[in-house]
Amino acid sequence: MTLQQLRYLVEVAQRGFNVSEAAEALYTSQPGVSKQIKQLENDLGIIIFERVGKRLTGVTEGGAQVLAHARRILAEADNLKRYVDDYTQGQRGALVIATTHTQARYALPEAVTHFRERYPEVTLTLHQGMPDQFAEWLMRGDVDLAIASESLKDAPGIVALPCRQWHHALVVPEGHPLLGQKDITLSDLATYPLITYVRGVAGRIRLDGLFERQGLVPRIVLDALDADVIKTYVGLGMGVGIIAEHAFDAQRDVTAGLRRIEAHHLFPANTTYVGIRRGALLRRYEYDFIEDFAPNLNRSLVQKALQGGITGTAGSDWL
């Protein structure tokens, strides 16, 4: 049994038992992957994957236990490498962060700037995507950290550390009727065409729930991945925008003829989380990045959470 065989095994399972996709992800051949998995089954004396002909269709009962052990072994092997790298090359390495457009554009620049100044020999990479992808990326080891406001706190195998709270705000063109209206309600908003985020990004699911609980059907004329697109079409008069309040640039957006309306009374606070694979061994510069981005998350607290010493990580008392 080798680490390479275990990697093949886990990758095939993660790719929905598609050996071709697993081989492509591992930069090897499909026959090579199949051969190594068959060899592993022979060595262990157990059938890991269910088959129909030559096609893998599922995992056997015993195979599920083998997979669980394989994931733990690979995680510990990764942790060992991280420990050695941190010990021998503390100021060098790589940090890969998965995040959304809104976080990358409006929340992360300051922390990224500080990090690059402090660790010039560490390569920092941002992968933008949808939050529902981030847990899989973390578990596969494709990214080291994930920062988002959706999905992370409920993902198995992921420690989600709450770090910031924020509200939605309304964005309208200059001269819009809502600017002169007091005590705006959700019923008022439902009379206008609305432009906001796609489901799964920046609290959209919670927004939909608010309207639904009041028996309202909002008229969403455009949903977008990021606030910049939303603001563009608000400026074209297409509708009222609902964006993360920190995504409004007071100088640039006002110059473009947009106005922000605070809406704390309409929308509850949302929470941004830092997601980390449970049990991961972080390098010192990863702890430093997290604490710079979220000062409430010091190294000691993060370590306790990763080791399972703190429960209820979504609690507001962390913020």
Image: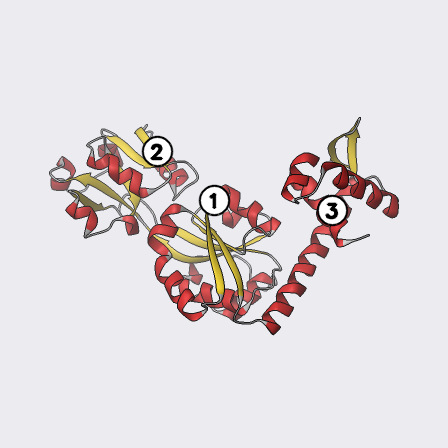
Q: How many marks?
A: 3
How far apart are labels 2 and 1 at the CA level?
Answer: 16 Å
Where residue 147 appears, x then y in whole percent? 45, 53
> Which mark is first along the chain, 1 or 3?
3
Question: In the picture provided, is 64 more to the left or to the right than 202?
Answer: right
Secondary structure at numbered mark 1: helix
> Which mark is first along the chain, 1 or 2?
1
- State the residue at coordinates (46%, 43%): 129
The residue at which mark 2 appears reads as: 223
Where residue 139 appears, x then y in whole percent? 60, 50
Q: Which mark is on residue 93?
A: none
Q: Quadrant of the C terminus?
A: bottom left
The residue at which mark 1 appears reads as: 131
How crowded pointer 3 is (Cα within 10 Å; few <14, some 14-19, many 20+) is rated as some
Query: Foreground: 300 or 87?
Result: 87
Give amino acid for label 3. Answer: Leu
How far apart are labels 3 and 2 at the CA level?
Answer: 39 Å
Question: In the picture provided, is 178 more to the left or to the right than 244?
Answer: left
How crowded pointer 2 is (Cα within 10 Å; few <14, some 14-19, many 20+) is rated as some
